[in-house]
Amino acid sequence: MSKTVAIIKNENQAKEIIDLIDAYILPLENLSINYHHTFSLKQIEKLTKLNKEIFVCVNKNIHNNELNQLEKNLVELSKLNIKGIIYYDIAVLNIIKKLNLNINLVWAQEHLTTNYKTVNYWYKNGANYAYLSSELTKREIDEIKNNTKAKLFVNIFGYIPMFTSRRNLVDNYINTFNLINQTKQNTIYKEGNSYPINDTNIGTTVYSNYILNAAEEDFSNIDYLVFNSDLIDEQEFKNVLKNYKNKEKNKFPKETGFLYKETIYKVK
Amino acid sequence: MKKPELLAPAGDLERLKIALLYGADAVYLGSSFNLRANADNFSLEEIKQGVEIAHSLNKKVYITVNIAMHNKEVEKIKDYLIKLDKINVDAIIVSDPAIIEIAKENTNLSIHLSTQASTLNKSAAEFWKNQGVERIVLARECTKEDIKDIKENVDIELEVFIHGAMCASYSGRCVLSNFLTNRDSNRGGCSQICRWDFKLYDKDKLLAGDKPFTFCTKDLSLARYIKDLTDIKVDSLKIEGRMRSIYYIATIVKTYRKIIDEYCNNKENYKYNLEYEEVLRKCANRDSIPQFFDHKFGKDRQYYNGRVEVTNQDFIGLVLKYDEKTKLAKIEQRNHFKINDKVQIFGPNEEFNLNLEEIYDEDMNKIEVVRHPKQIVYIKVPKPVETGWMMKCVDKQ
């Protein structure tokens, strides 16, 4: 039986949806990327009192001068009642192993978590969980499940980050041409499609032009199904979770992303 | 003092030979399972030839095997790695750690970790060293201080990109190509969406500058920091561009060869020659800057010229042969040239200017203009030149 996981924005939202989910994903302040809302260690500690599984997302590329900050945060997190840490940079795994911290690891290299052999490689190196790429087909996901002992996370609802940069790409443009970015709720537009773009002090993220909505697909073999509330109205998000729990269709159009659409890489 | 390796791209055998001729210590190239799926990649037979050529010159060949595998590649990769091992390549450049594991279990291949793995810190570097990786190609977002700190704290070879195009994203963290064109960027299908123009909105309001919004960045050049990288003891200096022309490869490799040799051969009296920057800039026809190395990655590092770059037509001919008796050089045309043009002929260690006074066609008839691509002609050259030397236009009449 799959567990329902929500990537949330704030403490109130956590309480609002508590009966609809099994676990939360909380992006860690300053050390996570691709989310509009993050949580401090204090806020995370508070949320552990809700007695739900908590996975803390530490998915930023770690620059050399951030290692001390990372280590301090990992030590603090290991003292909290959290289920695991979602990581991108290998420094997270290396520090946890070196310090022998008692904490589960979720290998989540976003677009690189794409085959069972590499899932198993990280499993052997201490990551008992893997958070699969959104660019996989359903068949590939099932194959991975059949060939690994690692527990799997799969995105089934929400915007998908498709580009992450250290550069401040919106600010650079604004500053080059002396423009005013009043609301900072930015999108880029091309050929009929709008893509949300978010520029913060740690870099820029661009998101898919659609909300992935694969809640009706059969993922009963997958351990954790992720609903991402980033950029989604909180009430509408709650309704999606309710619909899911009641096995009903939600109001968003069905969008299966790459689940039935294989990408190509050689064009000639 | 130990010279860092100068590592150049090789898109095919011709470019491999040119890179080695003009001073590269090693070349990297791809066949299968690499991030240039749509380039003219090498066959295994061509890799074998390339390795033999390089080894005969006491130089090295590294093979990029840097895709993020999907399940179907997992089943095929082992045989390929075994074949590479038999060909005696000097290392494979890998980003997917499952390939490291398969290579370790089945071959004696040396492993270099690709920049796709985005190694930015000494803790990650330490992990990879313990996994048997011999060299790390650092992330292009590393500063000088990052590189120095990693080198001082982890006993592993470091390779640093010094010249060429940059990803706008952290390497491996961009699937714009997958979403917008259904081509998988992490398996070699990147369609360079970062160079497309977009309209940028602030809610409903169009933010329109004089040029359209793009992710595109200027190119990288660390020419003026070769001294610093050498002092830090970086092991290998890498030039990007497996799809670039022989003229580009020759010019860039030759320029960096000079810089490395000038510094390493006479450290006390070394003075950076600013003219090299003009040579590098002119060759690529794009601005190049130090990017993250000197901590500045603000607005001046972006490239808002759209896709209107003018093709460089300086390269006009390739020397195929020279006859000392007749003093005629056999030239293969690469761009239009004619009688009385002022040209420069250059080889790996020499260059001189020449007025084109006599041009002959293949039947030794005098001609005025060389118009046709790859046309074979003969020109009078008073000094000996060699196969692989090039001719560029200095002043067209």
Image: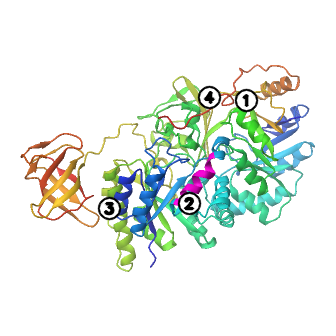
Q: Amino acid at mark 2?
A: Asp
Q: Is residue B79 left or right of residue B58?
A: right
- Observer able to see residue A187: no
Q: Chain of mark 2?
A: B
The residue beneath circle 1 is A232
Q: Which mark is residue B354?
A: none
User: Where does the magenta region start and end?
Assistant: B76-86
State yes or no: residue B83 in magenta.
yes
Residue that appears at 68% across and 36% down: A136
Between disc 1 and disc 2, the foreground one is 2
Callout 3 secondary element: helix
Residue highlighted by disc 2: B85
Crowding at mark 1 (Cα within 10 Å: few <14, some 14-19, many 20+): some
Residue type at mark 4 is Asn
Q: What is the chain letter for disc 1?
A: A
> Looking at the picture, how far across and down is residue A85, in whole percent?
79, 51
Query: Residue A214: x percent and y percent?
Result: 74, 27
Q: Which mark is residue A209?
A: 4
Residue at 30% of width from left, 57% of height from top?
Answer: B279
Marks 4 & 3, CB-CB < 8 Å contact: no
Give neighbour class at mark 4: few <14, some 14-19, many 20+ (Cα, 10 Å).
many
State the CA–CA distance, disc 2 to disc 3: 38 Å
Crowd band around label 3 with a 10 angstrom C-alpha radius: few (<14), some (14–19), many (20+): some
- Circle nearer the N terminus (2, 3): 2
Are labels 3 and 1 assigned to the same chain?
no
Helix, strand or loop at label 2? It is: helix
